[in-house]
Amino acid sequence: MIKFLKSTFEKLKEGTLFLSSTITTLAIVLIIIFLFKEGIGTFNQTPIEDGFSLVVNKNNPINELSANEIKNIFDQNITNWKTVGGKNDSITLFNIDNIGEFYSDSAIGENFEYLPQCISDYTEKNPGTIAFVTTRYTGKGFTGKILTTTKVNISQFISQKEWFPTAQPAAQLGVLPLILGTLWVSFGAILIALPLGLATSIYMAEITSPKIRNILKPLIELLAGIPSVVYGFFGLVIIVPGIQKIFDLPVGETALAGSIVLAIMALPTIITISEDALRTTPKAMKEASLALGANKWQTIYRVIIPYSGSGITAATILGIGRAIGETMAVLMVTGNAAVIPHSFLEPVRTIPATIAAELGEAPQGGLHYKALFALGCILFIITMAINLIVGYVSSKKKYNAR
């Protein structure tokens, strides 16, 4: 009986563990599927908001415009149809709110029922006109031409340089500044964190006494448990004003501020893993180096660091992963300007900060909403690539250790 109960209990434990791992795996897979399903929905959609259309004269030879061309036309950077492949004729922007200046109330109708005819008449009399109107005014009685727009595709999404997802008439969905901003801030963080983290790990592993190490180790690990918003406050109150004053800048919210904050946040990861890697160096190798006449620093430089190279590399890559995925602290100190960075003293915007700042305002199911999920897909791919590199480096370390 006791044997039966013991066996049943063991099977119950195994079943619980299996169920737990299965639920966890399924949840992760479903989250990834949902992320990519929503992100892929960005593509092959028109950049013009649902319910609106661009209309021109019915004899205008232009049938399709890209989002960038539409922006330049309405910003009046393009003023002639010839620039976009049409006739040599000036482009006239027509605002539907000004329709009362050209037609009487009776001509428009009490309930705007004759507005389609008025728009048609205006575009007929002014061949170079382009108007941005609601789709309901392009129905019965409208005789002009409705332009189609180039749909959003992956190459444009990644390569274009302007991120204005709520712009009208056409959303500008260029994520290149966001990708470069994320990599730029992370690169700066590693430049700061790697030498500091490596120096601290060498000190703790090879130089200091066990007593001091037992004090430093918990303090450094404590840094990893501090909420990121606290780092953000620290950066906003201390680092941002300091950078503004030192470099005499109009604002201190820059890529450098984000890099410093992220470097502080990445330090516990780099120090802890690097120190563990350094301490795995066989004692016999150190003693052999000293016996050959090398001093302590030469042994550290020539023997211990090369032996721990793969572990230090893994620590660095994990630190980069920590920096790339950080949201709140970066959102608070980088200035959130979606522009391509040229120096560390300019505001930037990162992918996580963009998702956090805009997802609450994006209409669910709309183009902006799906574009933010596409940004999440890009971040997921970057993080997965980093994890694969860590896995490769770790496997190389195990192979070398044999």
Image (tube, rainbow, N blue to C red):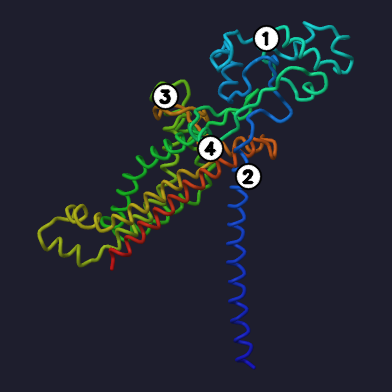
Three-letter amino acid code at the position of disc 2: Glu
Three-letter amino acid code at the position of disc 3: Lys
Residue placed at 57% from the left, 11% from the top?
Answer: 79
- Report crowding for label 3: few under 14, some 14 to 19, many 20 or more residues within 10 A (C-alpha): few
The residue that disc 1 covers is: 127
Q: Earlier in the sequence, mark 2 or mark 4?
A: 2
In the picture shown, does residue 10 fall above or below 260? below
Taking the image as drawn, is residue 237 in sight?
A: no
The residue that disc 2 covers is: 38
Q: CA distance from mark 4 to mark 1?
A: 34 Å
Q: CA distance from mark 2 to mark 3?
A: 44 Å
Q: Disc 4 vs disc 1: which is toward the camera? A: 1
Residue placed at 28% from the left, 68% from the top?
Answer: 402
Q: Please give the label number shown on residue 154.
A: 4
Q: CA distance from mark 3 to mark 4?
A: 42 Å
Q: Please give the label number shown on residue 245.
A: 3
